[in-house]
Image: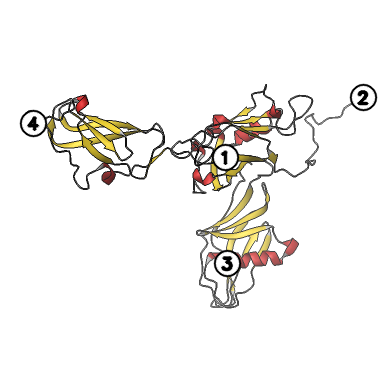
């Protein structure tokens, strides 16, 4: 729970007490919460609003007492008042719930920004043989896959020690490499019960994959290849997406799980692509819906993947990157405003672990990962096919 979060505190008593009964519970944070019976009943309820500068691994109640200055009392239906305020063993808040209080912001800061464009981030195509039968391999056995019309045939097993789909993938990789230029650039791998081939080149490929064929050296009636097993399938490469890499310090204060998508932790309204560093231009702004994922890959790097729509919108915005707003192009800037970085509890990043002030605004000039030069793809026309000119 972070700053400003509210937590329900409910005290149950042994018999019905009259509405208006009240006590004060002091938490192990040192804060006091008034618990009140709204109506006749066996519960008194209060709300704890988490203030600044609090941290507890397990919120609990330290004491329950009457505030005589507030004329508090707990009275049953027969006029008898509560005089014992001992909390039963194993019945405290900390025994029955696990509530963590954390109002310390992450000591994290952005220092540099790199943009990996949609061309650089092209998505590769994957071929897959779904659920091929894994035979018991013996000496002399081998395997074959037809990929893009190329037969990739492994060498015969020298010992029959191969026993897994990963072993077969390794045999195929060795065979593919031995073909040199006649092979297909990419890598075979075992993914759960499937055999996959991932192309080295990005973008769509024209090839397909067939079944996995097994040459049984001990087959009765003579060694031969079987009819193949598994169903071949081809993935369609996804649309290439722009990626923003943030480097800096203290990012594991945000999250320690590199696989976790933490895009909701950030306030994207405070991250602005400042076109040409021009204060008179609003630049490109972001919303959480523009972000496909954001992951803390290390203590010094955050990888932000944009949606297809935001990638296209950003890269076609006048003034983006080397395209100037006006006649003279100037370097863009990324404005990281105070409050952009937050942790899971919603606590805003601070300058350092000993400073409770929000981190200051930062403006940095982005770099770009694209190292390719433009090339001609084709020359075509939208004009109709016919003869032009006087004849």
Which residue is drawn at the image coordinates 79% and 32% (left, top)?
381
Q: Residue 80 — which label? A: 4
In primary-sequence order, the first of circles 1 and 4 is 4
User: Marks 2 and 1, Cα distance to the nearest angstrom?
Assistant: 70 Å
Q: Are marks 3 and 4 in contact (CB under 8 Å)?
A: no
User: Marks 3 and 2, Cα distance to the nearest angstrom?
Assistant: 67 Å
Instruction: Tell me: residue 172, above or below residue 321.
Output: below
Q: Residue 109 — which label? A: 1
Which residue is drawn at the image coordinates 67% and 56% (left, top)?
148
The spot of residue 243 in percent (x, y) is: 62, 41
In primary-sequence order, the first of circles 2 and 1 is 1
**For mark 3, what is the residue?**
168
Judge whether residue 69 can be spotted in this image. Answer: yes
Left or right of residue 383, residue 44 in this image: left
SS assignment at label 4: loop
In primary-sequence order, the first of circles 2 and 4 is 4
| 2 vs 4, front mark | 4
User: Marks 3 and 1, Cα distance to the nearest angstrom?
Assistant: 46 Å
Quadrant assignment, res 210: bottom right
Judge whether residue 241 can be spotted in this image. Answer: no
Q: Residue furthest left?
A: 78
In primary-sequence order, the first of circles 3 and 1 is 1
Q: Are marks 3 and 1 in contact (CB under 8 Å)?
A: no
Which residue is drawn at the image coordinates 55% and 78% (left, top)?
218
In primary-sequence order, the first of circles 3 and 2 is 3
In primary-sequence order, the first of circles 3 and 4 is 4
SS assignment at label 2: loop
SS assignment at label 3: helix
**For mark 2, what is the residue?**
390
| 3 vs 4, front mark | 4
């Amino acid at each position: 729970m972070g700053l400003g979060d509210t937590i329900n505190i409910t005290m149950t008593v042994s018999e019905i007490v009259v509405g208006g009964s009240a006590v004060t519970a002091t938490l192990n944070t040192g804060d006091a919460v008034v618990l009140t019976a709204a109506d006749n009943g066996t519960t008194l309820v209060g709300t704890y609003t988490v203030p600044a500068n609090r941290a507890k691994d397990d919120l609990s109640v330290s004491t329950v007492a009457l505030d005589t200055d507030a004329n508090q009392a707990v009275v049953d239906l027969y006029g008898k008042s509560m005089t014992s305020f001992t909390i039963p063993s194993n019945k405290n808040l900390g025994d029955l719930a696990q509530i963590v209080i954390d109002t310390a912001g992450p000591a994290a800061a952005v220092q540099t920004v790199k943009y990996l464009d949609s061309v650089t981030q092209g998505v590769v195509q994957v071929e897959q043989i779904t659920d091929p039968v894994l035979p018991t391999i013996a000496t002399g056995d081998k395997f074959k896959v037809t990929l893009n019309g190329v037969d990739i045939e492994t060498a015969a097993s020298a010992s029959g020690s191969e026993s897994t789909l990963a072993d077969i993938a390794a045999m195929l990789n060795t065979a593919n490499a031995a073909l040199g230029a006649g092979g297909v650039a990419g890598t075979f791998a075992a993914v759960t019960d499937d055999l996959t081939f991932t192309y080295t080149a990005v973008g769509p490929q024209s090839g397909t994959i067939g079944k996995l064929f097994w040459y049984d050296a001990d087959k009765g009636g003579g060694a031969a290849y079987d009819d193949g097993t598994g169903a071949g399938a081809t993935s369609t490469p996804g649309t290439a997406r722009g990626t923003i890499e943030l480097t800096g310090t203290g990012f594991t204060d945000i999250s320690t799980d590199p696989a976790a998508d933490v895009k909701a932790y950030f306030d994207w309204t405070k991250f602005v692509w400042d076109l040409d560093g021009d204060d008179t231009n609003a630049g490109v702004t972001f919303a959480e819906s523009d972000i496909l994922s954001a992951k803390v890959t290390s203590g010094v790097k955050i990888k932000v993947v944009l949606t297809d729509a935001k990638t296209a919108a950003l890269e076609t915005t006048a003034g983006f990157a080397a395209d100037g707003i006006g006649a003279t192009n100037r370097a863009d800037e990324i404005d990281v405003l105070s409050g952009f970085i937050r942790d899971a509890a919603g606590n805003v990043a601070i300058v350092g672990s000993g400073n409770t002030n929000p981190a200051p605004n930062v403006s940095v000039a982005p770099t770009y990962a694209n190292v390719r030069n433009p090339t001609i793809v084709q020359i075509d026309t939208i004009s109709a096919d016919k003869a032009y000119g006087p004849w």
